[in-house]
Image (tube, rainbow, N blue to C red):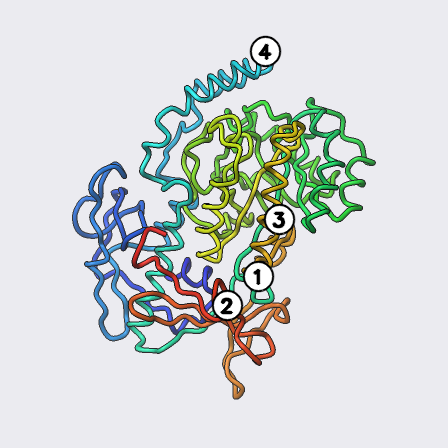
Amino acid sequence: MNKCFIEHYRCPEQYVRFACKKTVPLTNGYFLFGQGATCYGSYSGAQPSLSPDEALCDVLRDVVIEGGTIYLPFNPSQVVDNLHREVYVGEGSSSALARMYYFLRPALSIAVRRHLQKFHLRGWDKLLFPRWPVDCSVDNLLEQLMLLSLRATGLERIPFIWFWPEGSSSCAVMTHDVETEAGRNFCAPLMDMDDSFGIKASFQIIPEERYGVSPEFLQAIRQRGFEVVIHDLNHDGHLYSDRKQFLERAAKINSYGKEYGADGFRAGVLYRNQLWYDALRFSYDMSVPNVAHLDPQRGGCCTVMPYFLGDILEIPVTTVQDYTLFHILNDYSIDIWKKQIDIITAKHGLMSFIVHPDYLMKPRELSVYRVLLDYLTRVGQEKAVWLTTPGEVNRWWRQRAEMRLVENDQGWQIEGDGKERACIAYASEEKGSLVLTVQAPLEEESLLLGISRRESRSQAAENGH
């Protein structure tokens, strides 16, 4: 029961005492755990709802604290895992209609494709779960558990290892999916633009059928400090259509990963089946959206933090894609991106962007992207955001997962590789809200996060984010 909490916060185990007071049934359904945390799993009590559209029972009222132990009516690790793996979506989320669309896609004009996509996505704005434009259910659940831990222990604060290196308040990564030969040819100008704002990105490269991939092209990306990620096999929308075919394709994809020296993977169209990830030989994946109302495969992992799926680190897509913004929503501003950035930075999470070189070759779209880069760099400076690459996130998150807090005569210390970049943070409660304070590595001062950059107040207990 304690696993998800310890993995998230990296706090000493003596402060984590969760248990189930009653036997939890096997029936899964939807319920709330405080405002802003929609859960999917089983709990002891009333029957969970079969749909997130119903009036959901808030099981926070059923929590009991006795003798320093927090008795929950559900297993939080099961709920978090269910959301991370999108278990609530069920099988068959990649519909026959979507598969037929990708079979016919090469013969369809752009105008026809957009019309069909909008038809397929109709009613997306009426979906209540996951919550648009960012769903923080997992993050809010874990924050509520931290508040309960503070109350159960009677401590003023609980130490943990801060989420990002050097005390950064949050993190942002830019990724570029290269879908066509024209997009490949636009990679160099796009790197020029990213570089002009001091941003490095990853380029997701399709190995087969779409365009030629030369060693010189890959080397040109790396020489400039950008990263190469494998993007599907041929981007035909059928990667996960059949298990046998998937295993055959996965073998080729793994081979290309080794040949290209790529540690990361992203599936075409963000199709995914987390139960099959064990066939992929990559260190990290970037195929799971936070909320997928506007993607062919709906669902969402409901978190703004990286998380492990077995040995693979999932770096979720937490913002709307450029194609969706321009061609589905017909929005040529960065207003939605700004709203998502505000929500994610308030949670100290990861902003992950997908921007295609294929869709930036016109002045209007390129101008919007330039505005985004400018805004992102300003937010990075004002809020101490770590602007980095997916590969660096992967390396850091794996180091942090192996670190531990130990107490000695000098107080709490971090042990493990990379500890020189890590910071100790403290969780406390103030007026019912979770307050996170980050201590600088040299212990001379606290790094101020957010507006005050001294302490961060999480409002999960008071609102939906």
Q: Is residue 290 above or below residue 172?
A: above
Q: Amino acid at mark 2?
A: Arg
Of circles 3 and 2, the one toward us is 2
Spatial distance from mark 3 to mark 4, Cα to Cα? 34 Å
Q: Is residue 79 above or below residue 451?
A: above
Mark seen at residue 453: 2
Q: Give SS at disc 2.
A: loop
The residue furthest bottom is 409
First along the sequence among labels 1 and 4: 4
Of circles 2 and 4, the one toward us is 2
Q: Give SS at disc 1.
A: loop
First along the sequence among labels 3 and 2: 3
Q: Position of residue 230 (x, y in %)?
A: 66, 37
Mark seen at residue 384: 1
Quadrant hosting residue 352: top right
User: Is residue 281 visible in this depiction of the protein?
Assistant: no
Q: Amino acid at mark 4?
A: Ala
Spatial distance from mark 3 to mark 1, Cα to Cα? 18 Å
Q: Nearer the viewer, residue 430 or 277?
A: 430
Q: Amino acid at mark 3?
A: Pro
Q: Which residue is mark 3?
A: 390
- The quadrant the N terminus occupies is bottom left
First along the sequence among labels 1 and 2: 1
**Within 10 Å of the Cα at label 4, are there few (<14), some (14-19), or many (20+) other Cα atoms?**
few
Q: Which residue is mark 4?
A: 107
